[in-house]
Image (spheres, rainbow, N blue to C red):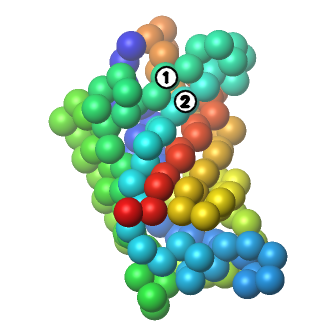
């Protein structure tokens, strides 16, 4: 399976959009370091076609948010390519935008899950529409 997918689309630039303090995510909710345990693509046309690049390639993804709302990401695809970026956290909705990709975001305690159904991934026979799910644990 080819792994040099849409990795840079996720970590090229970062602008985080949290939610109002009473209804969801904000800078205080996300402050700290987060490490992905799952970085999983699912084929939108065939839900049984799934690849977690952390498990498959030894990839890693981290995100750090500081008290002022500055966030940074680092993605290592496990195949020799890395990308990183930083930006500012804005609190307006339960959406996080990373590298131009918009993720639905949910936090439960020290676990943050990001999901985006508008990704593409090469499962081995060319790029196809995919959903990316990233599950991160607070360090």
Q: Residues within 10 Å of mark 2 (few under 14, many from 20)?
A: many
In the rendered image, residue 75, in percent from the top left (x then y), is placed at 33, 49
In the rendered image, residue 87, in percent from the top left (x then y), is placed at 44, 75
User: With 30 as the anchor, is 117 left or right in this view?
Assistant: right
Q: Residues within 10 Å of mark 1 (few under 14, many from 20)?
A: many
Relative to the observer, which residue lies in front, 97 or 127? 97
The residue depicted at 53 percent of the width and 47 percent of the height is 135
Q: CA distance from mark 1 to mark 2?
A: 5 Å
Along the polypeptide, which appears first: circle 1 or circle 2? Answer: 2
Relative to the observer, which residue lies in front, 24 or 79? 24
Name of the residue lying farthest toward the front: 109
* Image position of 23 with respect to 138: above or below: below
- Which corner quadrant of the image does residue 55 belong to? top left
In the rendered image, residue 110, in percent from the top left (x then y), is placed at 54, 62
Q: Secondary structure at mark 2?
A: strand
- Which corner quadrant of the image does residue 130 belong to? top right
Relative to the observer, which residue lies in front, 119 or 74? 74
Residue corresponding to mark 2: 41
Task: Assign the N terminus to one quadrant of the image.
Answer: top left
Q: Secondary structure at mark 1?
A: strand
* Image position of 43 with respect to 96: above or below: above
Name of the residue lying farthest toward the right: 23
Residue 86 badge? none
Name of the residue lying farthest toward the top: 125
Can residue 22 be spotted in the picture?
yes
Can residue 88 be spotted in the picture?
no
The residue depicted at 23 percent of the width and 40 percent of the height is 81
The residue depicted at 49 percent of the width and 84 percent of the height is 69
Name of the residue lying farthest toward the left: 80
Residue corresponding to mark 1: 51
User: With 92 as the anchor, is 53 left or right in this view?
Assistant: left
Q: Are marks 1 and 2 in contact (CB under 8 Å)?
A: yes
């Amino acid at each position: 399976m080819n792994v040099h997918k849409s990795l840079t689309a996720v970590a090229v630039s970062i602008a985080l959009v949290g939610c109002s303090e009473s209804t969801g995510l904000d800078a205080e909710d996300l402050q700290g370091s987060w490490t992905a345990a799952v970085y999983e693509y699912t084929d939108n046309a065939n839900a049984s076609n799934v690849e977690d690049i952390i498990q498959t390639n030894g990839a890693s993804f981290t995100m750090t948010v500081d008290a002022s709302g500055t966030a940074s990401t680092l993605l290592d695809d496990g195949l020799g390519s890395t990308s990183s970026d930083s930006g500012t956290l804005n609190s307006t909705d339960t959406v996080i935008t990373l590298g131009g990709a918009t993720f639905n975001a949910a936090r439960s305690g020290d676990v943050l899950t990001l999901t985006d159904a508008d990704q593409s991934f090469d499962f081995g026979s060319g790029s196809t529409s995919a959903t990316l799910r990233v599950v991160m644990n607070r360090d």
